Amino acid sequence: MSNNKYSKEHIKYLQSIKRKRKIILITQISILIIFFTLWELLARIGAIDTFLTSYPSQMWKLFLKLAANGSLFMHIGISVFETVVGFVLGTLFGTLVAILLWWSDFISRVLDPYMVILNALPKTALAPIIIVWAGAGISGIIVTALMVANVSYYK
């Protein structure tokens, strides 16, 4: 008997699985590199608007700068705080509205066309409207998250 506890066929099979995993990983990394390279090149030649998309190289430099001076974690903390507050308020407000609509057939029927319109809108279309109404500061971000959460809540 052989000292191996696996047959040659099983070892070949395991090696083929490892090979497939490597090929998949290499392909995934290649796609990522190609994506960022194309993005950088298209931004450099002016094919895409860098005001909206910037350059990957500039974003990387800014990331390193913010990480080095310690403000990256402050910005991450603020974003997480705004997201959590918006989610919690959106969930509470959405639940209250849902209870109100369930409780009152009259209110449900009155608000139905407006809810259908709000639901049909792309969620990102609400952001500029809300920013004009609530401002671009922390309150505007929280209200945007609240409204997007509520509009998504009705689906």
Image (cartoon, rainbow, N blue to C red):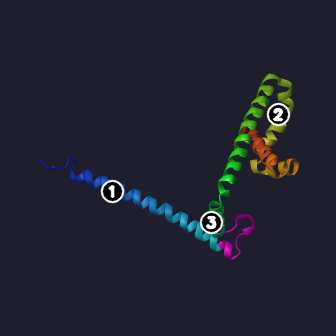
Residue 39 higher or lower than 12, as above or below: below
Image x and y of residue 126, in percent: 80, 48
Q: Amino acid at mark 2?
A: Asp
Quarter occupied by residue 55: bottom right
Badge nearest the viewer, 2 or 3: 3
In the image, what residue type sits under mark 3?
Trp
- Whichever of callouts 2 and 3 sits on the residue coming sooner in the sequence is 3
Eyeballing the image, is 150 above or below 122?
Answer: above
**Which label sits on residue 101?**
none
Give how far apart the Cα atoms at labels 1 and 2 are: 57 Å
Q: Secondary structure at mark 1?
A: helix
Residue labelled with disc 3: 60
Residue 112 marker = 2
The CA span between labels 2 and 3 is 46 Å
Secondary structure category for the residue under label 3: helix
Q: Earlier in the sequence, mark 1 or mark 2?
A: 1
Residue 75 included in the magenta stretch of the image: no
User: Residue 82's spot in the image, x, y percent?
Assistant: 73, 45
User: Start and end of the magenta stretch?
Assistant: 42-56
Q: Position of residue 111 (x, y in %)?
A: 85, 33
